[in-house]
Amino acid sequence: MSAIDLMFPVQGGPVPIDHAYPLFSSLSRRVPGLHERKDVGVFNLRGTRMGRQWLRMEGGTLRLRCGPEALADLLALAGSSLALAGQALRLGMPTVYPLLATPTTLSARIVTFKHAMDEATFQASTLRFMAALGCSGTPSVGRRRMVSIAGNKVIGFALTVSGLSPESSLLLQERGLGGRRHMGCGLFLPPRLRVALNAAEGEAVGNSM
């Protein structure tokens, strides 16, 4: 079995829009060893923007991408409570979604590479890492963005890759690009879903430059 997405319903909150680091910290307290798992990606929470700094979580969701070896550990999150930035969240029973090889175009909200602070360096790093991954496609660099990690601002860019073969599409979804997948970076979705999630994550505030 290849990687899958787990979609947990979330109740509680509200939570800060820039919440990637506290979310992963909270999940790590529930799932021992999560820091060491390279096959798990944690998307930003999906909710409804409330003012300039907060997401309301009524009807919200948490998406986790994982390999089969991590499935049992992550399913144990169902019904658990998380403390995030002083707010209590409760996760429901997840829905399992297989990754599909059909999208020929995929987008990531933010991708980060070491020392890739400008668009030209980022483009070169993208091509180099795609080649190392064995993934063929045409990358298009989007907006410069940032994510807060342990008090530090990490710079990255939005990225869309088009012209993907079925094999490259699955590979890019399963492996991603760059680092910090635990913080929502380097995780790819079909563009329509990515646009909807950007709005639901409060993309216009806090995570863009």
Image (cartoon, grey):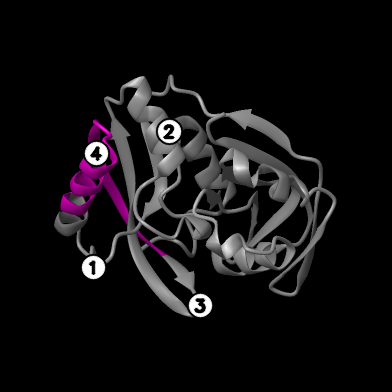
The part of the image, by quadrant, that contains residue 112 is bottom left
The part of the image, by quadrant, that contains residue 82 is bottom right
Q: Is residue 97 left or right of residue 134?
A: right
Residue kind at label 3, given as amino acid type = Ala
Residue kind at label 1, given as amino acid type = His
* The label number, if any, that marks residue 115 in the structure image: 1
Q: CA distance from mark 3 to mark 4?
A: 29 Å
Q: Which residue is mark 3?
A: 150
Q: Earlier in the sequence, mark 4 or mark 1?
A: 1
* Magenta residue span: 124-146
The answer to whether marks 1 and 2 mark residues whose Cβ atoms lie closer than 8 Å is: no
* The label number, if any, that marks residue 139 in the structure image: 4
Q: CA distance from mark 1 to mark 2?
A: 27 Å
Q: Neighbour class for label 1 at 10 Å: few (<14), some, many (≥20)?
A: few
Residue kind at label 2, given as amino acid type = Pro
* Residue 52 visible to an observer of this rendering: no
